[in-house]
Amino acid sequence: MDTAEQSLSEVIVGDRYAIDLNVPMSQFDTVGASAFAVRDILDPRRKFYALVQRPGSLRRNQTVRKLMGRTIPGLLCPRAEGVVAVPGDGERLVTIIDYPAGGAVADDVNGFHAISERMIREQIAPQIFATLASLDSIGVSHRSISLQNLYYRDRQKKEIVLGDCFSAPPAYHQPWGYEPIERVLAHPAARGEGDAACDMYAFGVLLMSLFLGRDVGGRDVGGRDVGASGGADVAAHVDARIRLGSYWALGGSNELTGAMGDLLRGLMDDNASKRWMLDDVKRWIDGIVSRKTVPDQGWLLGRPTMFCDRGMKDRRQLAVAMMDAPKESVAFMRHDRFRQWVENALADVTSSEWLDRALDQRLLNNTADLTAKEEYMAVARLVAVFYPEAPLVYGSVVFYPDGIDYYLAMLMLDGDVERLELLSDFLDRNRIDAIVEILSGRVSSMRGQSSRIASLTKHGAAPGLGQGLERSLYELNRSMPCLSPKLRGLYVTDLERLMAALEAAAARGDMGGGAFDHHIAAFMARHLSALDPMFARLSSLADQPENYAIEVVRILGTVQQNAYPRPLKQLAHALLPTLKRPVEKLKSATRRKQAMALLTALAEAGNLMRIANELNLRTLQQRDEREFQGARRLVSQLSVMQRRLEQPLDVSHGQVRLLGYKLAAYFGYIAVIVVAASLFLQGQG
Amino acid sequence: MAKPQRKTKLANPPSRKSAPAPRVAAASVAARPTGSMQPTMRGKPKGQQKGQKKGDGYNIVALVLILLVAMMAFALPSFIILFGGMTPTWIAFIVDDRRMPYRLNTIGACNLAGVIPFLGSLWLSGHELSHAFMMLTDPIVWATMFLGATTGMGALWVGPHIAAMIYNTRAIKQRRDIELNRRALIEEWGVDILPPQDAVDKMKPAPTS
């Protein structure tokens, strides 16, 4: 490759890292980013790779911020980041990460040499423990601990490192087995940030895989490879783990005894409060075995029941089955003996009054067929009642509140209109509040999520520009770049860049369909709250195109005043045709001409606020209409006058005769004067 | 807090140009005869105007009679020439319609213009009664004096024709002004400004002559 070609395919980040876009490193690809080779210009001996973020996909920015530049021996940490122009793809966010020189611990996850208990106790578990302790100390949960994401840092394969944990939504790439049961049920992008307990569970599955020499977390109960997401089998997978417990379901017939068995059983306990945490592992490494005594979660039903011809002993099992069968769930809850059964079955955790509220007595008593959305809501209530640790469920929308931001971004990236509509519907205050009320106080994962849910309900179901799910997306992800298709190829994270991007788009002539779309409006409103009432006013002007156009300019002008103190000539010129339309409707040609001249002059100045303020269209239109009516009356009067003047006058007309006689009289007076004067002169002569 | 008042540059459009008001033309047209046969008398109530007019007429008659009696007493030759020569005027005075005051004035003035030369001749020849009677025996004198009255009658016939010509000429100019104003309004406001029947033939210019 000659130098010119190389420079075309190479982009520089932070004046130090040269990313070679011709050398992909697909083994590090994630759903959010593509990996490429990196050359360190300052120190060529150091090895890195680059993750070029895909547009619209969410990076775990909080995590990146906490890890940037930090040295955690057991983790591939980000070293630098920057926005670079990738040829053909536009601006992209790039993260430079340590390169694991020793490669993956398990090149083939389906078959590798099992690692001995001694090796695990002395080498691997302490290293990963130290890494997790470091992460815990800075409040980060890794959420991507799996065999596929485990590497050797050095060529000698002595140091183990966990791979990238921030370029994709948390746990997105986690095979089912590596996720706690309740989190598996959510959409891969909506599994949520989770907590240290999630990491500890994945740590247990990882150790079990290393110990057994096969990836136990990456396979379903039948031994088939399931990857991170799957179809209907997820229900069977979860069902098996609920029935057997994750340790037995994933470990199969391998009865692990001794200290290793204690560790894995402790880490893979499905009861998060009973699960071993870092201090338990530390004790285990030191040779002490912990025994945790915690209250029973009450998963077993007080009275087993039959649902869809299957016996149900565990309320989690019943809830999971209900998620897949909404109609049957509604029929089940309307059964004569349901109320009595549920009070007995959940006697230890609920009261009768609480059940009345939670199960919506109105639905129970109603015998009419429910709409699909009513069915979804009924199932959402049932799942929340029976399995509060489960994700929120509404039809095919299944998410954890702490993963809603990634989920929303993913749905938008995929253009999944059906699920977005469902989500928007679910975010209606009545629905989400009912579910939150059922869950409050019963599940720890809901703690700290109230602000997220408040943000979702405040904006998510609200109609109009600047609101909706787009607004929720930007509210939940403060550093999210604007995903508007109008800004394709640009990485816009603040209003200044947005205005610059709109100016550039206007210069290219890409402003078709107006300056805003839902993304741009939501992005603006998120970054400048003063725009909220303006967008509300804009929505109310949808049927008044003239005022709508001015309001658009006013909003852009406000943003310009606040964030972009430079002229926006191209944008102003791009908006001119829309603004000219109402001006062209003015009836007075002079006023029209003056308004056009003013518009053009203001556009040339590039000050959008001045356009909005000085072109007072409403006043202009009112005055124009008033004067038009006046002129119309005048024309009518002129027409009447003209018609009158068109009739010729003759001598029979009184006034004509009067004037004629007056003229004749003057003639007579003149005659008298002339004759008398001439006679007098004659006499004198 | 009160909102700051926005500058509205275009809130005050040029009303003179945008809605030109043809005031001159309208005033001119308003002065055009409306068809009434009655000349308007301004400044006084109608009843009072009538009584005043009647009184004036009687005053003139009285004045003329006083003059005639005085002339008969002190200037009989002149009285004879005037009384005879102004016969058409006396007849007009008797039969004339008082609603057209200028008719009598015209006939009287023209008749007087025909009589004055003979009155001058009478005064130059010593203002003799015999000379006056001699003049009255001359048919040329009668013809001359009556020709004056006839000229007055002619003027009364020609006058209205000239007046009609003046009015019609002025109407043409006024129509031209109105049309210019109308066109300016249409140019400013567009054809929507026209009444529906005019809009049909909006492009057809109104006849200017």
Image: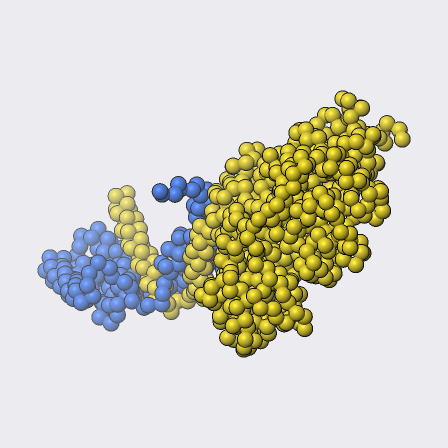
Residue found 18% across the figure and 52% down from its top: B126
Q: Is residue A529 left or right of residue A22?
A: left
Residue found 24% across the figure and 72% down from its top: B95
Rendering colour (chain A): yellow
Residue A341 is at least partly visible in this image: yes
Q: How many marks?
A: 0
Q: Position of residue A206 (x, y in %)?
A: 74, 44
| Quadrant in the rendering for residue B53 | bottom left
Furthest-top residue in view? A42
Q: Position of residue A494 (x, y in %)?
A: 59, 38
Of B134 and B143, nearer the camera is: B143
Residue A583 is at least partly visible in this image: no
Looking at the image, residue A399 lies above or below residue A370: above
Q: Is residue A3 left or right of residue A675?
A: right
Looking at the image, residue B168 lies above or below residue A190: below
Furthest-left residue in view? B73
Q: Is residue B41 left or right of residue A479?
A: left
Of B55 and A374, nearer the camera is: A374
Q: Position of residue B9 (x, y in %)?
A: 46, 42
Q: Is residue A458 left or right of residue A53?
A: left
Q: How is the image coloured?
A: by chain
Q: Position of residue A599 (x, y in %)?
A: 55, 43
Residue found 65% across the figure and 50% down from its top: A269
Rendering colour (chain B): blue
Quadrant where the image shows the C terminus of chain A: top left
Residue found 85% across the figure and 31% down from its top: A5
Quadrant where the image shows the N terminus of chain A: top right
